[in-house]
Image: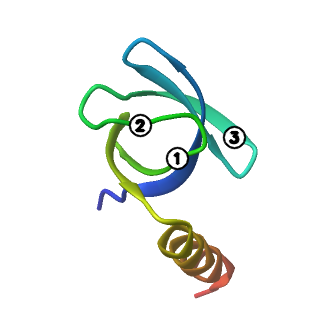
Amino acid sequence: MCVAIPGKVINIDGTKATVDFSGNTVIAEAGLVNVKVGDRVLVHAGCIIQTMDEKMADEMEELFNEIEDLTI
């Protein structure tokens, strides 16, 4: 299963963006959508696929945290 996860753009260099995921940073392709520093974005397979508002990003992060806390 593949999942797109929310992050925050902290730097842009050409079509590459540095995205922060709760303290972990990755370089993602930013050429598919218009982004700016500070945008909350969804990243899938190394590409930013959409921007999102703060509320939606926060809700997704909460959901991922809840899933992470589940034990089987």
Q: Which residue is mark 1?
A: 39
Residue drawn at point x = 64 percent, y = 75 percent? 65
- Circle 3 SS class: strand
- Circle 2 SS class: loop
- Contact (Cβ within 8 Å) of mark 1 with mark 2: yes
Name the side, left or right, on which 69 lies relative to 56. Answer: right
The answer to which of 71 and 54 lies nearer the viewer is 54
- Disc 1/disc 2 C-alpha distance (Å): 6 Å
- Circle 1 SS class: loop
- Disc 3/disc 2 C-alpha distance (Å): 19 Å
Compared with residue 68, is residue 19 higher up or lower down, i.e. above or below? Answer: above
Q: Which residue is mark 3?
A: 24
* Residue type of the residue flagged with mark 2: Val
The answer to which of 10 and 28 lies nearer the viewer is 10
Quadrant of the image containing the C terminus: bottom right
Q: Could you tell me residue 38's position as x and y percent?
A: 60, 43
